[in-house]
Amino acid sequence: MRERVTFVHGRDVQIDPSALRLRPTGLTGPLADVVRQDRLSLTLEELPSGLARFLRAARAVHLRWTSAAEGDALEPFCSRLPPGLWVSLEPLTGEWRRLGEELCGWLQAFGPVDCMDPEAFTVADTGGRLSLSFYQMIGNLVPLSSWGEREFCPESDSVCHARLRNLDAVSLDISFDSADHLLRVAASGRLKAQELTVAGSENRRTEVGILTKDEPPNIGPFDMGLGGFLTVLGEHKEPSPTLFAFSSRHRLSGASFSSEFLSPTGLHPTLQLNLSTDTAEAEARADVECKPYAYLTLPKAVFADRYQLQDGLLLASKNLSALRHSTLPVDLEAPAYATGTWGSSILLELAPPADRTGKSWTAQVPLHARYLKPTGTGYADVEVAYPAVFWACTPSPSSQDTLPDFANNPFDRLHLGYDSLFELDRTTFWHLSPVPTPETGRLVNPLTIPTLKGGGEEWIRLGTTAVVGLGFA
């Protein structure tokens, strides 16, 4: 087992290396405003036997969980996803139903996850490879922490128990690839004041980095620089200074956005995106071409009509350019309670004002609500996750700049759902920071959907019977 703990702080935070203490039990340091990321790499032999057996039947498994809580981001930990749990599975063979059921069983570690029906997954065939996808809004990692303690932590490993019991992540990545048979886990926390403390363990090799943004000489236009200190617990007597650069696939744009449903909502709600600026900072830094996008993950109660989003006049009136992707199938007629699939995701290219002035602007996404089961009030409340909004930038055809080389990025993040829809070796994503809704303080949009009132279904059945009876009169 290998572990890497990285603390990243802003340039305004000064950390004195003399305040860092390396001891046989670990690293201790001062209190500072930092983002902490913990990464673990485990072999199949280090996993519970049932989990290892499941992974041996998979080509790849990727889980991405994102918190709905507001939190500031620091580069390089700045990629964005809609809040909730997103899962992708590639089976080694075409027998995906059995493997999907097994995956769903393991997902119950996150709490109740509604995936037992194989139809809950969306299934895609890309180049002869089957892949399954699933999404559900999950608010926290408390059930997973408890499960992890039971399944992974020996009774004597107090560090393992404490680490899981105090898990306070805003994002969690779990990935397996059959190419190297390693399970990789990365948990990133929020920016907050915390002690620079890492406990060592004889059960794993632990690397520690304390870093901030810096600029090495001759840094490239697509590169990010970091400087600070590195050490390996139990091997080094003191941290070593470091300064390095790498191409980063994900960057902060410096802009922000919010989203809200316009009133009245009814059965045809409109989601409005409010963007703080119509310009892309990346275009001022390098010879690139940038376009803004929104990636939406919609629960089964809400969907986008892909045929409606092919109407050029409608798109222009909403400051939209094109629907670039939609998961399939999406039944446009079925009520939510008759829909097996988890929901859908769409990638929309936005259309900023032609005159780029740096001013704020809006885009509107027309959506549709499915019929829900009757309620006592005649209304039902659902939550729709904030989208991920970003500028996707690629080198212009005339650019003389060297293409980015993301392979050297030790913090690279892939398999986010939308990244594979672009040229992965050429595209940099400049993310807008989400501003939560005032009503909830969370990165979700509440939506009230009208329903029949409780008992209304009996009137419908009675009316249908009467009409049929009159037809035979």
Image (cartoon, rainbow, N blue to C red):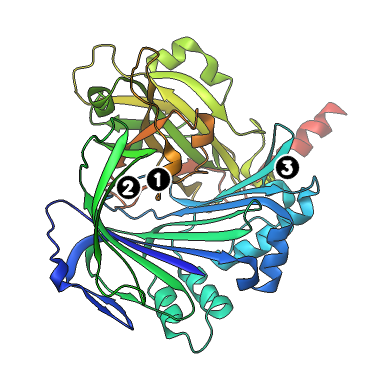
Is 324 left or right of 71, judged from the image as shown? right
Q: Is residue 346 visible?
A: yes
Q: Quadrant of the C terminus?
A: top right
Q: Position of residue 238 (x, y in %)?
A: 24, 72
Amino acid type assigned to the residue bearing label 3 in the image: Leu
x and y percentages locating residue 255 in the rendered image = 24, 35
Nearer-N-terminus badge (1/3): 1
Find disc 1 in the rendering and name its residue.
409
- Residue at the image position 83 percent from the left and 27 percent from the top: 471
- Is residue 295 shown above or below 376? above
Q: Secondary structure at mark 1?
A: loop
Residue marked by disc 3: 462
Of tags 2 and 3, which is closer to the observer? 2
Residue 304 vs residue 173, the one in the foreground = 173
Classify residue 341 as left or right of residue 64. right
Residue behind mark 2: 76
Q: Secondary structure at mark 3?
A: helix
- Residue 194 in which image quadrant: bottom left
Query: Of the residues shown, which amino acid type is indicated by label 1?
Result: Asn
Tell me the amino acid under the disc marked 2. Pro
Task: Please report contact status of discs 1 and 2: CB closer than 8 Å, yes or no.
Answer: yes
Q: CA distance from mark 1 to mark 3?
A: 65 Å
**CB contact under 8 Å: marks 1 and 3:** no
Asked if residue 36 lies left or right of residue 473, the reply is left
Crowd class of label 3 (few under 14; some 14 to 19; many from 20; radius 10 Å): few
For mark 1, does the 10 Å Cα neighbourhood hold few (<14), some (14 to 19), or many (20 or more) residues? some
Where residue 372 sits, quadrant-wise, is: top right
